[in-house]
Amino acid sequence: MTKNFELCFSEALDQVESRIDAMGDPDRVEADRTAAGLQLTLGTGDKIILSAQPALEELWVAARQGGFHLQWRNDGWYCSAVDKALWDLLLQLMDINLTSCDHGLAL
C-alpha cells in the first residue's frame, strides 16, 4: 500500500457516506459512523458494516450475505473473492437486501 492505511480507510468511509447521503432517502438506506467504522442500515432493517483490520491492511464488509475482505489495489479497495470494487460490492449487497421489501432501490 502506497498510502497510509488509516487515511485510505477513512477516505473510503467518507466517500461511501457521501454517496449514501446523496441518495437522499434515509428510509431505504442510512449511513452512520461508529467507533469501528461505518454502519449502513437498510429499509429492511438489515445492516452492512464496514470496519478496518489494520494488522492485515484490509477493509472488511459484513452483511447478511457474508463477510468480504478488501485490499487496497490501484487506488481503491477491491475484493478479489467476488471480483468487485468496494462501491460495486456495496451496491450489490444493498440491492440484494432491498429487493426483498416493497420499495427496492434502483441505482
Image (cartoon, rainbow, N blue to C red):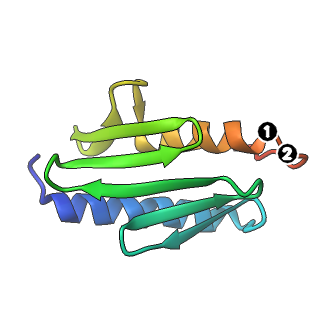
Q: Give the CA separation, mark 1 to mark 2.
A: 5 Å
User: Where is residue 74, by image quadrant?
Assistant: top left
Instruction: Name which quarter of the figure residue 30 lies in.
Output: bottom right
* Residue 9, x across and y down, in percent: 28, 59
Identify the residue at the far right of this view.
Answer: 102
Instruction: Name the element at disc 1.
Output: loop
At x 20%, y 64%, the residue is 6
Whether residue 7 sits left or right of residue 98 in the image: it is left
Residue 28 percent coordinates (x, y)? 75, 59
Q: Position of residue 4 (x, y in %)?
A: 12, 60
Residue designated by label 1? 99
Q: Amino acid at mark 2?
A: Cys
Numbered-mark total: 2
Instruction: Pick out the residue farthest to the left.
Output: 2
Whether tag 1 and tag 2 are in contact, CB under 8 A, the answer is yes
* Residue drawn at (29%, 57%) of the image: 52
Which numbered circle lies on residue 101?
Answer: 2
Q: Is residue 73 left or right of residue 31?
A: left
Instruction: Give how far across and how far down residue 69 sits, in percent.
Output: 33, 39
Q: Residues within 10 Å of mark 1 (few under 14, many from 20)?
A: few
Residue pictured at 50% horizontal, 65% vertical: 17
